[in-house]
Amino acid sequence: MDPAIKVVYSFPPKGRKYTSCVVEVSSEVRSVLRREPRIYICYSACRFADYVRTLQCFRCLGFGHTSTGCGSSALCGHCSERHDTRECTNKNREPVCANCKRWLPHDDIHHAATDGRKCPIIRRRIMEKIKTINYGCES
């Protein structure tokens, strides 16, 4: 395998025929890949996008640390009550984002606290992180 391409994570198919992967590439390889709408791997036309995530604790739902070193109380990522997400008995109810409830109570709070597509707090943190990434482009 080319040292300029490193598989960081492979998502299990979960009912799909194919899996998804996160790969890390050099800025030069990224530039080449961005020229076309698809990448071809073993006769398959694959979609791709930049994958940027932010470090989020699954215990307290805060940012910048993991549950391993977390000293805060547990908050559920689904219902925002004081228990671990994996112990939630409210999965049949509409989700309530604990972070949006805490910091943006006027916004839509009906999404999971770990949903990067719907949570404005996670999206903002990802956008802040993107601003610090050097993609090798000239300014």
Image (spheres, helix red, strand yellow):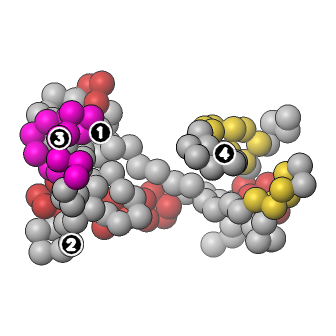
As for residue 25 lying within the magenta part, the answer is: no
Q: Disc 2 marks which residue?
A: 108
First-in-chain label (2 vs 1): 1
Q: Callout 2: few (<14), some (14-19), or many (20+) C-alpha neighbours within 10 Å?
A: some
First-in-chain label (1 vs 3): 1
Amino acid type of the residue tagged 1 in the rendering: Cys
Whether residue 124 appears in this view of the structure is: no
Q: CA distance from mark 1 to mark 3?
A: 20 Å
Q: Disc 4 marks which residue?
A: 19
Amino acid type of the residue tagged 4 in the rendering: Thr
Amino acid type of the residue tagged 2 in the rendering: Asp
What residue span does the magenta drawing correspond to? 79-92
**Left or right, 110 with reference to 14:** left
Q: CA distance from mark 3 to mark 4?
A: 30 Å
**Compared to 6, does 134 lie above or below?**
below
Give SS at disc 4.
loop
Residue in the picture at 76% in, 59% down:
46
